[in-house]
Image (spheres, rainbow, N blue to C red):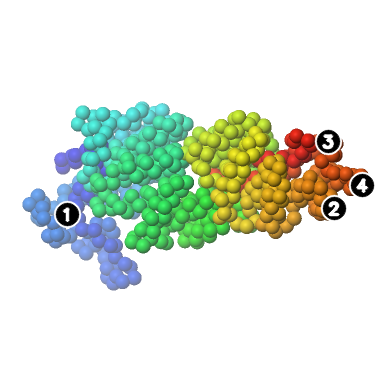
Amino acid sequence: MVQNQKTPTHHNSTLYISPVVNKKNDILYVTPPNPATSSANKLLETPGSKQSTSSFFNFDKTSQHHHNDLSHHSLDDPLTPVDKLRLWRHDAIMQHQYKTAEFIGDKILELTSDPNDAFWLGQVYFNQGNFLRCKDLITSNINYNNSISCRYLAGYSLIKLEMWDDALDLLGETNPFKNNTNTTSSSIRSNSCDDGGIKLEASMCYLRGIVYANQNNFERAKECYKEACMVDVKCYEALHELLDNNLMTPVEEWEFVMTQLNYRDNLDGNEELIKLLYTTKLSKYLNTSKFDESEHILKEEYDLSENCDLMLSRADYLYTQCNFDECLNICERILNKDQYNFDVIPNYLSCLYELGGKNKLFLKAHQLAELHPTNAMTWLAIGTYYLSINKVVEARKFFSKATLLNPNFGQAWVGFAHTFAAEGEHEQAISAYAFAARLFPGTHLPNLFLGMQHLQMNNLNLSEEYLLASYQICNSDPLLLNELGVINFHRNHFDKAELFLRDALNAAKNLNSDSKTWISIHANLGHVYRRANQPYKALECFNQALKISNKNDANILSAIGLIHLRLGNIFKAIDILHDALAISPLDPVASDLLKRALEANKENQEIFNLAPTATIGKLKLPSEISINRRTKGIEDVDSASDDDDDEDIMDIEQN
């Protein structure tokens, strides 16, 4: 019987108990033989012959002359029988021959009763999807249960079984090693891992975060993920959860990754590379110059210009800048290189929606439904397609299915809420947006959508509160700036409204020329100038909106007609209002204004002496609702606002 291997501490990774690492002085890694170049004799060699080797291990003792510690390992000492069984088991695991690994692993465990052998047999069960068997194996023996690696695997099995409370009992509600008498939190971060793997303590912190996230305790989940990264910077799974789910604000993200993580220990000379890669993952709302610098170094010095992950970071940057055309081009490049890359799908779907790519949306949704029918991303794609063709009820059904498959799928919750917003069901939309805000506390979009819904319900105070909360996270989104302009318009703060709308125009410079957002901001600014008694500036804005839209719009033409009426240009107003009615014959605002203009012309009197008439209905610009993380459309004009001397029949509004 061989002596049991030492059980790893929480500072070690599972590599510590791998026979590959444990016998690294006895093993030479070789590339498996290439059948195309091997001779027929080698292909037909009898298994177990002197020339035959495992595809993963070659026990050539002559390799030991490369090592300096030969005094600890005799060249004449052969591997023990159990060692050979362990290598057989490990080779079977590496080749995914789990029945073989289970057959041999079970016998090894009976021979040794070693917790490390229990861990590897548990790995076989886990990889086969037999999570309950894996958990029972480990918890059946107190020695196995006391092993850090075994406890980690048992906890992960319980998570896979969605037994959250049991998993938390096994893992602990807090990190049990954090206040260890021999290990303070600071010394944990500086204590390197002997084998270069990921510390088990960090991995257990990550699992603890998964449990809290599935219990909707996102604040505790965030702390666990942060602790995992601080214990071991190589625990990228935890960092991915933090960044992908926007659990931190952009400022918190940059401060955490740039100043609180320890890149010096146990990265074996890769400190700069890892820090640059992590930097490209951070929020693109701020420090864009640092992102550009990191991206440039990775492309030029590390030759990663065609790396899909780096291209995805660029796509995220373009998306936050509303540059949907370029973002779509990069997404398509990624999919051409790796068509099963699910990380790029949300951006790809959103860009197609924004740019009206209905055919491509249909094709991608069809492909995903055929190949990945149980993935929540598939039903997000299908819901996006149905929303793009204005089948709101069908879209809601598929968004709902995506949330059932993945209750923490924030993009699906936002899409689900959009379907209610599209039908004017504000209360249901607010409920869904609020849940998305809990899932994505570090992004400005849920609060933006909540503010828009409350504004439609004329809850100006609540709306402003949500919009300002969104503004604290991101102050460069043109839609958000437009909404803040609308709020100030309704409060008759025309100077502040003009300031926000001007900022919105500057932020929207990268939009494509026919973007409804760009057009709507121009039109809204025109209404601000109109109400502020600056008619010529208002006319300039409305004419610019018509110019970039490449087509006449009845609502904008009606606004221009109103201004000409107030300026006394009655014949000009009549011509423009006729044009508006030619586009939209049943438009009540254009009809009422034309009636006024004709009466004024008939009576040959000034427009400002006209008596007030009935309040007119709404003028609206078309609106778009995006899936994923962003809405880019704006609705525009509304009715019934009194000036000092006459009743003004138009006002601006968002959606």
Q: Please state which of the two labelled residues, at mark 3 or mark 1, is closer to the viewer.
A: 3
**Which residue is nearer to you in this view: 297 or 184?**
297
2 or 1: tag closer to the N-terminus: 1
The mark found on residue 353 in the picture is none
Q: How far apart are labels 4 and 3 at the CA level?
A: 17 Å
Q: Is residue 229 visible?
A: yes
For the C terminus, the quadrant is: top right
Q: Is residue 130 visible?
A: no
Per the image, the residue denoted by label 1 is 26
For the N terminus, the quadrant is: top left
Which residue appears at 28% of the width and 62% of the height? 31
Per the image, the residue denoted by label 3 is 612
Per the image, the residue denoted by label 2 is 571
Determine whether the residue tagged by mark 2 lies in a helix, strand or loop: helix
Per the image, the residue denoted by label 4 is 602
**Which residue is nearer to you in this view: 532 or 439?**
532
